[in-house]
Amino acid sequence: MLNLEGRVAVVFGLANKRSISWGIAQKLHQAGAKLAIGYQNERMKAEAQDLITELPGAEAFQCDVSNDAEIDQVFAQLRERHGKIHVLVHAVAFAPAEELKNDFLQTTRDGFRIAHDISVYSLIALSRAAAPLMTEGGSIITLTYFGAEKVVPHYKVMGVAKAALEATVRYLAADLGTRNIRVNAISAGPIMTLAARGIGDLRTMLKYHAERAPLHRNTEQAEVGNTAAYLASDLASGVTGETIYVDSGYNIMGF
């Protein structure tokens, strides 16, 4: 098993037990990391805190990643409690529901801004806050999807946001490499998360994916967690700026 003993991992984006961030948090915990897990707002507090009690020693905190003051406050608390961190997981994405219902051509200016602010800029904001605490180097991990590079029905403005996110990973990797901070993305296959349920006809997408992927099944939450644990560890010390697919091989198929 990977050994992350003595390392502090900060995970943003926990909503419920179906969240990919929950699968990641579980694997990081199993590897021995000390966890700080963030949820978005008061509405999500109860469920998030109930889950976190399953990971002895983990801390819970509230942080809206579109609010710079909240980000600053959280990282000030992390500095006070731990002095340093080693892993940052960005599992945050959002677009207004109407933007996923209308034709992409009808994407509104405000919807486009919101999707990119929360799904993309938040990675920059969190990385900027985390980097000064990564005094021993570190690993920053975000989550993307195949819709960043190919047109996926119903994904629309989120596909454009994920494309921007993948480019952001590369630019952050270039900026932070001199500090021995690695930045990578995991491109997970479709999983029935709270966020994914906002995408139209998700069940058809899951069925299609399972039929055509080389492994002939859908991606499991724990598999994404395993890859995140690898990226968080020294086994991935030479890996940065990459998008790693955990999608049962779906991305390699032509048709």
Image (spheres, grey):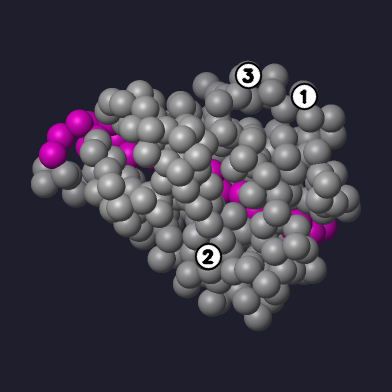
Mark closer to the chain start, 2 or 1: 1
Q: Residue at x 68, y 44 (%)?
A: 226
Q: Secondary structure at mark 3?
A: helix
Residue 220 shows which numbered tag? none
Query: Neighbour class for label 1 at 10 Å: few (<14), some, many (≥20)?
Result: few
Q: Residue at x 64, y 49 (%)?
A: 227
Q: Residue at x 11, y 46 (%)?
A: 105
Residue 54 shows which numbered tag? 1
Query: In the rendered structure, does residue 171 fall within the stretch colored magenta?
Result: no
**Circle 2 residue:** 242
Q: Amino acid at mark 1?
A: Glu
Q: Amino acid at mark 3?
A: Ala
Report how far apart the C-alphas of labels 3 and 2 lie in the structure: 35 Å
Q: Is residue 160 left or right of residue 42?
A: left
Q: Residue at x 59, y 69 (%)?
A: 240
> Residue 211: x and y, percent?
38, 33
Residue 46 shows which numbered tag? 3
> Residue 8: x and y, percent?
78, 51
Query: In the rendered structure, does residue 99 fall within the stretch colored magenta?
Result: yes
Report how far apart the C-alphas of labels 3 and 1 lie in the structure: 13 Å
Mark closer to the chain start, 3 or 2: 3
Q: Residue furthest right?
A: 6
- The residue range painted magenta reads 82-103
User: CB under 8 Å between callouts 2 and 1?
Assistant: no
Q: Is residue 164 above or below residue 67?
A: below
| Discs 2/1, front | 2
Q: Is residue 135 above or below residue 222?
A: below
